[in-house]
Each structure stands twice: as C-alpha cells, then as structure tokens.
Amino acid sequence: MSKARRRRLLVALCVARQATRQLTPTRPIGQHAVISDEWLAAFAEGWSRTKPAAFIEFFIPLIEQDAVFTQPLARTARGHAAIERMFRRLFTVFPDFMLSPHGATVTADVVTIRSMCTVTAGSRRLRFPVQDRLFLRDGRISRREASFSVFPLLGSTLISPKTWVRLLNVQLPIPRSRAT
C-alpha cells in the first residue's frame, strides 16, 4: 500500500460515517464518526505485512509521534523510535507472531480490536485471544494497550531454553550508540 493510499485510508477512517448497527454510537471526530470495520481492515492489512520492516512502515504513519504503547512481556514504548524497537524485538523473539483480527468496536475516541494470535513459542504452536485498545487523537493512535494472557506463551517459552535469551532481550533496554 502506497503512502498516499495509507493517508487516504487514515482520512477515510476519520470521516467515515458509522454504518454498522451493532456498534455503540460514537462521539464524532470532526463532523463524522469512525467506522470500526475500516479500523479492522487497516489493522488486518498491517498485520498481513512482512515483519518487521513492512509492518512498521505501514503502522508508523497511523501513530502519533508521542504515542505510548503497552503490551504484556514488553517494556512500555513512547514515541516512534521506541515503538519500532518494541516491535522489532517482538518479531526477533517470535518471528511468526501473527494477529488475525475478527471484531472491532468504537466508543468515543477508542477503537477496541479483538484478534486471534498464532505464534510458535519454544516448540509449540499457540493460539490465544488478544485485545488491542487504540486511543485516538485527531484520528491517529495516541495510545495502544494490548492485553492477552501471558501464561501459555511463557509456559511454552520457559520449557525451551533456546528462547530464554531472546525473551530476555525483549525486556532489556537496547543500548543506544554514543556520539563520539
């Protein structure tokens, strides 16, 4: 998807009218409301991309510069650079980490997306539900809170010593190079 098309999608997300009767009415953003189906489609599009490069390239324009992302098993990330590092670490530990979104709701300026995650942890293939809450500011993501049960993932990872070091790398800060 080109940058221009991604921008048009972002604009469409901000100006689209609510069309699905199952949704809770939303507070308008500008003159119009956001349709959860469009966020769901955008989320699915981003997660279908090659990781990490194309994935990051797709999502970064949809994220505010000062956004805060939290999720289990990872440090809180603030800003584009930290968010990019967080996802690069995640895909280093779990290269096949994949979300398949299957539902979304919109209330006020919060989009909640329900997905099914599939990932190989240790030698086991796991599948578990994930919920992402995307807090919007001017139609862009200002905060993301992901939630899922860490126990299946940790259990499978802990019985596979090869993955311990990779998992620790997700939690430890990445040293920044010093200017000389």
Image (spheres, rainbow, N blue to C red):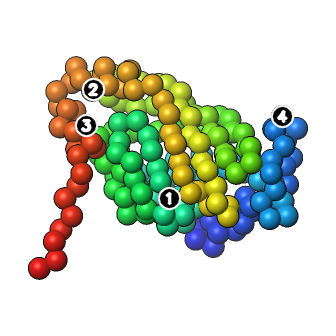
Which residue has dot 4 on it? 22
| Precedes in sequence: disc 4 or disc 2 | 4
Which residue extends farthest bottom?
A: 180
Mark 2 or mark 1, which is nearer to you? 1
**Figure quadrant of residue 103:** top right
Residue 157, label in figure: 2
Residue 167, label in figure: 3
Q: Secondary structure at mark 4?
A: loop
The residue at 77%/53% (across/down) is 34
Residue 71: give x, y in percent of width and height: 44, 40
Q: Nearer the viewer, residue 114 or 69?
A: 69
The residue at 35%/30% (across/down) is 120
Q: Secondary structure at mark 3?
A: helix
Residue 111: give x, y in percent of width and height: 67, 45
Amino acid type, label 3: Leu
| Precedes in sequence: disc 2 or disc 3 | 2
Q: Is residue 165 left or right of residue 20?
A: left
Q: Secondary structure at mark 2?
A: helix
Q: Residues within 10 Å of mark 4 (few under 14, many from 20)?
A: few
Q: Residues within 10 Å of mark 1 (few under 14, many from 20)?
A: many
Amino acid type, label 1: Ala
